[in-house]
Image: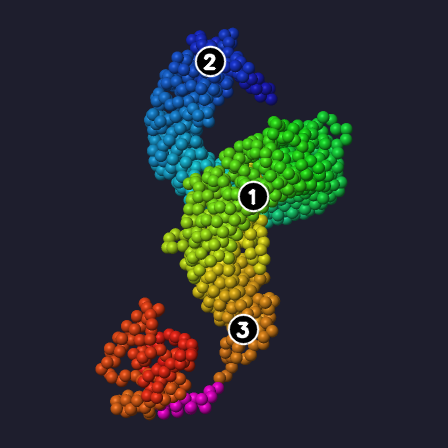
Amino acid sequence: MRMQLVSWFSFILCYCLYLNVNIFGMSSQCLVDQQTLLLKLKDSLAFKPGNSSKLVSWNQSLDCCLWNGVTCNGEGSVIGLDLSGEMISGGINNTSSIFSLQNLQILNLSNNNFSSEIPSEFNKLTNLTLLNLSFASFAGQIPMEISQLTRLVTLDISSLSYLTGKELKLENPNLQKLVQNLTRLRQLYLDGVSISAQGQEWCNALLKLKSLQELSMSNCNLSGPIDSSLASLKKLSVIRLDQNNLSSTVPEFFANFTNLTTLHLTSCGLSGMFPPSIFQVVTLTSIDITYNTGLHGYLPDFPLNGSLKTLVVSNTNFSGPFPYSISNLRQLTKLDFSKCQFGGTLASSMSNLTELTYVDLSNNNFTGPIPSFNRSRYLTHLDLSHNDLKGGILSAHLEDLPDLVYIDLRYNSLSGSIPSSLFSLPLLQKIQLSYNNFDGQLVEFSNSSSSALDTLDLSSNNLTGPIPSSIFNLRNLSILQLSSNQLNGSIKLEMFRRLLNLTTLDISYNNLSLDANVTDSPLSSFPNISTLKLSSCKLREFPLFLRNQYKLTNLDLSNNQIQGKIPKWIWELQFLGSLNLSNNCLVGLEGPLQTLTTILSVLDLHSNKLEGQIPALPPSVTYLDLSNNKFSSVTPPDVGTNLNAIIFLSLSNNSVHGSIPLFLCNASSLQVLDLSDNNFDGTIPDCLTKSESLAVLNLRNNSLHGSIPDTFPASCVLKTLDIRQNLLGGMIPKSLANCTMLEVLDLGKNKIMGGFPCLLKKISTLRVLVLRENHFHGQIGCPAGNSTWHNLQIVDIAFNNFTGMLPGRCFNTWKAMMLNEDRAISETNHLRFEVLQYGKVYYQDSVTVTTKGQTMNLVKILTVFTSIDFSSNQFEGSIPEEMMNFRALYALNLSNNALSGQIPSSIGNLKDLESLDMSNNSLEGEIPTQLASLTFLSFLNLSYNHLVGKIPTGTQLQSFEAASFIGNEKLCGPPLSKYCSESTKVGYKDSEAKFDWQFISTGVGFGFGAGLVVAPLMFWERGRKWINNSIDKILLVFFAMFGLVYTPIDDDEENGEDTEEQDAKKREDLYYNEDEDNSDYLDEFQGQYCVFCSKLDINMKKVIHDPTCTCHFSPPISTSASSSASFSP
């Protein structure tokens, strides 16, 4: 025991002596010249002492080897210098004393602000093994002299100078010259340096660096593809090539780097299939390939005890199921699969990932329930939004998560109640559960006053009951969104005053009765409020407390019952940027407004009772909606002089008269102009069609006349042109073909002339084409060429003068009508134009269609809706089979034409058809039984055709009224009252058939007798002539008795061949000379002859004509053997 104590004491004593010696030695070893050089360096550097932790401590009273950032060797020479993060703004140049520290091995000047070129004197520091010049604001060309530092093991010249426009470049020397002598390099960091090299060039430049372990060249303007020569760097463990335009596939050989720990390839334009074997590299700890939207792939089975800690594949085209083997990655901390195409259920094995801190699986197609995360005690961020997850949130899912800060489950199909335990998590700051199916009441929760919650978004659910009082105790709450639920009860707005940090409040679209009176209010009742949305809260007047809310930027009081005028003080809220007062009972504005200095950008006053003149408005307005009011004029003319910044302007559905105001020509940023449903007259100003910014032009239902200006520019960006129901004439302007992004073209109910608009056939984006009720004519379809209307979904050319046959070949290009879009997504996919990108404000396209016998206005043009209306034209011929390939068609109207032939049996292909009108044509044949298989068909009209047979029974066709089938004389069966006889039955019975031998024996006997008479005449020429002469004589007498004539046949065989030629010549002459007199056609007759007015004389050689009889000429008759010349009166 004693010996043990002695030993310990001896050890401690020796150790203390060692420390004293070394400390004394270190403090006395600083060489004077080294200290002098360092002090000189300090004096030359520009820095602020308040921002310095190292240079500020350098002084002569202390040995330089003890200064912060200085490292010495045993001889007192400085071998290490770390001046990183000192905010140095200058003083490093070729004359700097730093280059006299010849023994320097480590030099770190990172994170400063030198704002100069890198000095070329670095080649004097030949002992350097580590040189770090990263993020020090160096610019210009990297000097060649750095390539002479042959002992370098680590070189870091990373830069952010490109953000300031002053790049740090590696061009001459290039990368190869810089590193050709640095064969000992293990770490090379050149992030942000402009290298601008092709794949083979920069890969080959690294070939001499056989010891290289870490390569980081993000944002270096590198190009691809990644060359196979890179595979020779066997020791690579870290590869960072983010934000380069590699535009290539990911090489398989990355999986052969047995020491690989980090692979980052974000935003590289990668494509093709990502090698799944890379995920199975056992040493890999971090992989990030986000923002490569062309990159496909899937997740393989992960190896047992995998090393991955960071797994990020977001914003790619990865797909497939969520791997159950994810549980093998026991060290995983960050998991990000957001904005991919993954599907299926989330693996329950995720509950075994105990080290998780960050999970983002948003914007995928995941289904099923939420797995439990209660074992992931370090989890801080959980985002499962924008999927199709179902089920509820169980307390077990989220309990024991003391570090959870953020949870986002928006845009799913989650249901059930929201557990109160969610609000009790101590560090939770953001809860976002909007756009789900949560129901029930929000229950009170405990510890609300100590909660860290700053964001609570429960909007767009089915929550009921009152707002729990616990919410008003959330002292840190900044954003509260409870809109679009079924919350009820009365609530006083002043209760929200307790939330002193509140910046956003949205309780719109509930069943709440809001008392907006704030009693004893101070100057500002809500000191931090910036967004206030009280839409549909049963307000009857403007809350007066608003006049003091000077921080307010967004105010929505729409869909209330507010009456009277808009108060002037609302325009005086100096930071108000968006104001929505639509759907109220407002009758006017207190003004004037043009002198105000407001920054108001979005103003929505639609659906009120505003009347009179449109007032002059603030010059800052970019979005202005005054539709559905009672405005009558736009005078005075200075109304629009301040609208230079306007993007969206809607005056639709007012009573504005006069010509279209020319001040609109000055609105150079205008994208949407809607003047529909007014009383505008005059012509369309040229400046509107000349616009290079206008995307939507809606002038429908006015009294405009003239023609459409032919001034559409080559840079036309028009997507919607709606001039329906005016008095416009002329032709479709040729320059409209310049609008290659056009989606909706509605020219209906005008007086426009011309043929089918083939000049627009190259506009591949066209979806809606309406030419209804104009003066168009000719055939439809376009000449041979590439028609590109692949997206066409609504075509209405009814009530024109189109003729000819329906062009089946043209229909083959209308692909949108052949593809069945999922009905489940039909409500989200519709034609609209995004006006304000960040505010998510859209202009909604609409179109008027006639379907099911009624005219209706489609306010939303769903991409799933397809319709064809060719009615009331002069089309003829059969219905083309190609039209039966329109499997997505909802409505088809071919009525009031001259179509013939049968209804194609392939009509059964149109499974989505809801409305079919083929009335008033000349269709014939039976109704195909396939028509009965159209289960969605709710309107049918086949009346007034020539259809025959029995209406197929036992189907829904009997559910239609008889009016759907009338006017077909030979059609029978229910719902018609006409009974079908046995002879009208379709098809034949399969029952036993019996021969009627009586009819068979009669036929055989007649044939045998005729053969006995005719056969000899074929060989007996004299007998044949006698028979012919006898028959001629009999017919001459017989025809004369009825006032007719029979012409005997010349039996001269020699002239037979000439007679044939003469007959053919006569037919040819008749074809080309239809108006000539045909009386000489029959040489046998001299004079005029017609039925009931002429007869032959007794010798049957002269025509006797009755002059009192009106003679009708018959068409010429060609003579042939054994035929009579018949005439009609």
Mark 2 crowdedness (10 Å alpha carbons): few <14, some 14-19, many ≥20: some
Q: Position of residue 1044 (x, y in %)?
A: 38, 83
Indicate whether residue 527 is drawn in magenta.
no
Residue found at x 43% / y 54%: 755
Name which quarter of the figure residue 360 lies in.
Answer: top right
Q: Give the tally of numbered discs.
A: 3
Q: Which residue is mark 3?
A: 969
Name which quarter of the figure residue 115 lies in.
Answer: top left
Label pair 1/2, CB-CB below 8 angstroms: no
Q: Position of residue 32 (x, y in %)?
A: 44, 8
Q: Is residue 826 visible?
A: no
Residue type, numbered disc 2: Leu
Question: Between marks 3 and 1, how big is the CA–CA gap?
Answer: 50 Å
At mark 3, the secondary structure is: loop
Question: Between marks 2 and 3, how big is the CA–CA gap?
Answer: 107 Å
Tell me the number on the disc at residue 680.
1
Mark 3 or mark 1, earlier in chain: 1
Residue type, numbered disc 1: Phe
Residue found at x 43% / y 61%: 804
Does residue 924 sit above or below 500 in this rendering?
below
Callout in the foreground (3, 1): 1
Query: In the current view of this chain or complex, which residue is farthest to the left?
Result: 1054
At mark 1, the secondary structure is: strand
Mark 1 crowdedness (10 Å alpha carbons): few <14, some 14-19, many ≥20: many
Mark 3 crowdedness (10 Å alpha carbons): few <14, some 14-19, many ≥20: some
Span of residues in magenta: 994-1010
